[in-house]
Each structure stands twice: as structure tokens, then as C-alpha cells.
Amino acid sequence: MNHLVNILSNITGRKVIFPFYHAVADTIPIHLKHLYSVRNTALFERDIQLFLKNYEAISIAKASEYYAKNNKHAFCLTFDDGLREFKELAWPILKKYYVPVTLFVNTAFVDNKDLFYRFKASLIMDKLLSESAIDFKKTNEILGTNLQNKNSLIQFIMQINYANRGKLDALAILFKVDFTQYLKDNKPYLTTAELLELQSEGVTIGAHSHDHPLFNELSLSEQLLQISKSMNWVIENFKQDIKAFSFPFTDFGLKAKLFENIFDKENPILNISMGTAGIKKEVFANHLQRIPLENSLKTAKQILIKEYLYYIIKFLLNKNTIRR
Ligand SMILES: [Zn+2]
């Protein structure tokens, strides 16, 4: 065991952890390039070795039980967005070390039917970086802005939200970025057939909403529709015992009413749901918080130590449990 990680997990009493990723890539695809720090295969393999040295690898089916008992060091690994890099680069490494994993997918994007609006923003940003003559008059008409330079335009584009995502499609036409062609040429997402193949090799498939909205911008009924629509598709296609869901972006600001609905005693929509708040306790026993590993290219050891120290500070401030 690594000394410091071990000491900190014992001091904090947080023995079961939930690291999560989106992709692993040695050449970062353009649709991910401007969004987060994608780890290469060597760094990812080091992460896995660090986890295995300090924690037992457990599947999502055991996550709630282990988390509640909290008497063994364990890690439960998940990936979001259902990307091809998971199958091609991450899964071979996980198989090599016998690490169980869950892959959360969006129903609107599986089979490369459409592209997540943030991926669209990354593609447009990349095009603009090499563009010398930008038509600001037309751009400002589309955006309803008065932007005068490339930097402020890029900044604006990277902040376009789910409700305004249609503007990205309009900008793509203006800047000649062809999303349909990109989907065809690059196939960023896994297909249903590929997901079934992964499932047959031991991967658990979970839902990650229909088209990846930021949940706290939706009404309660819209939130429930996003969950049930994607979860029902997973249930129908993958016939698994566990109904698992990870919230797109963040579960920050989501109300108790939503979780009371999801985990209804008579008729629960889900068995387990996951957020992205790091090491934090939750009042809802089947809602678990995960640790993001892609905010930087620091090693898993550095990230875990920082998360544990941050947890201690939150504990001292009495802010280590999320109240809704
Ligand atoms: Zn996602």
C-alpha cells in the first residue's frame, strides 16, 4: 500500500472511492481537445496500478453495499459518454488487470446519431483557432452579441449552454464545420453492437441521460424524462440486473424531490446514481459521488491525496455531506 493514500483514507474514513473518466487517448480527438485533460494510455495504466495497490476493484453491483459497510478499501471505476476510446484504449488495460467497469451512455448519441453540444463547441473552437478571416457581422447576428475579436468569440462559444445549443449548429454552417461528416469519418461514439460486445466481455452499461443537459437547468419533469428515457433504453437492450445512472456534468443543485422519485420505495427508477463532487457523503444512500480524474494530468496518487485533504477541510467546516 501507498503510505500516504492509506493513511488519509483511514483518517477520513472514506475507504470506498469512485474514480471516473471519459476517455483515454494517445492522440486526443478534436471533439475532446478543448474540454478536459485526456490521459494517455501510460498515465491511465499508472492510475490503475495505484488504485489496485491501495484498493480492491469492485463492480457497480457491489458499490452500495461496500460503501455502506465501509470496512474495506475498494474502488469502483466508471466511464461516461460511451466513447470509442473506451473500447479501444481503456478496456484492454482494464481487462489486463481484471478491473470491473461501468460505461454510461447517452441515448441520443449511441450509434453516432448526433454529437454532444460541448463536442460541437470544441470542434468549432478548433476551426476558429486556424481561421484568419472571421465574419464578425454574421457571427454577432447569430449569437446576438457584439464581439470584436477571436478570443472573446471563442470564450463565448465555450460557454454556450444546453438551452442555446442550436446556436452551435448555426455557427457550424457559417464556419464550415460539418458535424454529420465528422460523425461519419470519426465515429466518436460506440454503436449498440459494440456496447453489446463489451457487455459480453463483462462491462456493465449504465445510462447518462438522453442528450446530456445540465440537470439543474431543467424542470423536475424534464429531469425525470431524461433519466427514464435513457434508462429504459439501457434496460431494453442490455437486460442487466442493475439500473445505474450517472448525472451528466454535475448533480450540483439537484433537489431531494428528484432523488425521492428516483429511489421510490415501491417503484424505483434506479438502483444507483452517481455525481461528480469528489469525496463527499450523501444523504441518499444509493447516490454516490465520484472523483474526476481529468481536471489535470496529475497522477492518480496526487489527485487522491488532494481529494482526501480537501475532504478533511470540508469535514472541519462541517461541509462534507451534501444536503438537498
Ligand atoms: Zn458526460
Image (cartoon, rainbow, N blue to C red):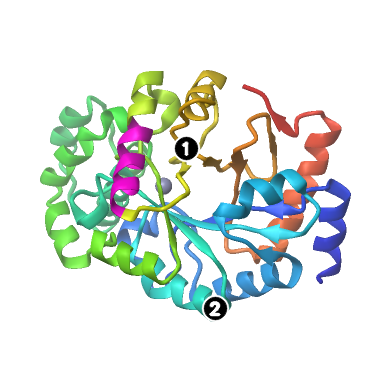
Q: Give the left or right position of residue 266, taking residue 190 as reference.
A: right
The extreme bottom residue here reads 96
Q: Nearer the viewer, residue 284 or 220?
A: 284
Mark 1 crowd level (few <14, some 14–19, many ≥20, 10 Å Cα): many
Magenta residue check for 58: no
SS for callout 1: loop
Label 1, label 2: how far apart the Cα atoms are: 35 Å
Residue 27 in the image: above or below residue 184: below
Count of numbered badges drawn on the protein: 2
Give the residues drawn in magenta, as a range: 226-237
> Farthest residue in the front direction?
266
In the rendered image, residue 68, in percent from the top left (x then y), is placed at 72, 43
Q: Nearer the viewer, residue 96 or 249?
A: 96
Residue 156, above or below 300: above
Residue 295 shows in this picture: no
Query: What residue is at 48 percent from the left and 29 percent from the top?
Result: 262
- Reading the image, the residue beneath label 1 is 270
Q: Identity of the amino acid at label 1?
A: Leu
> Residue visible at 31% across and 61% down?
30
Does 227 lie within the magenta span? yes
- Pointer 2 residue: 42
Between residue 77 and residue 187, name the one nearer to us: 77
SS assignment at label 2: helix
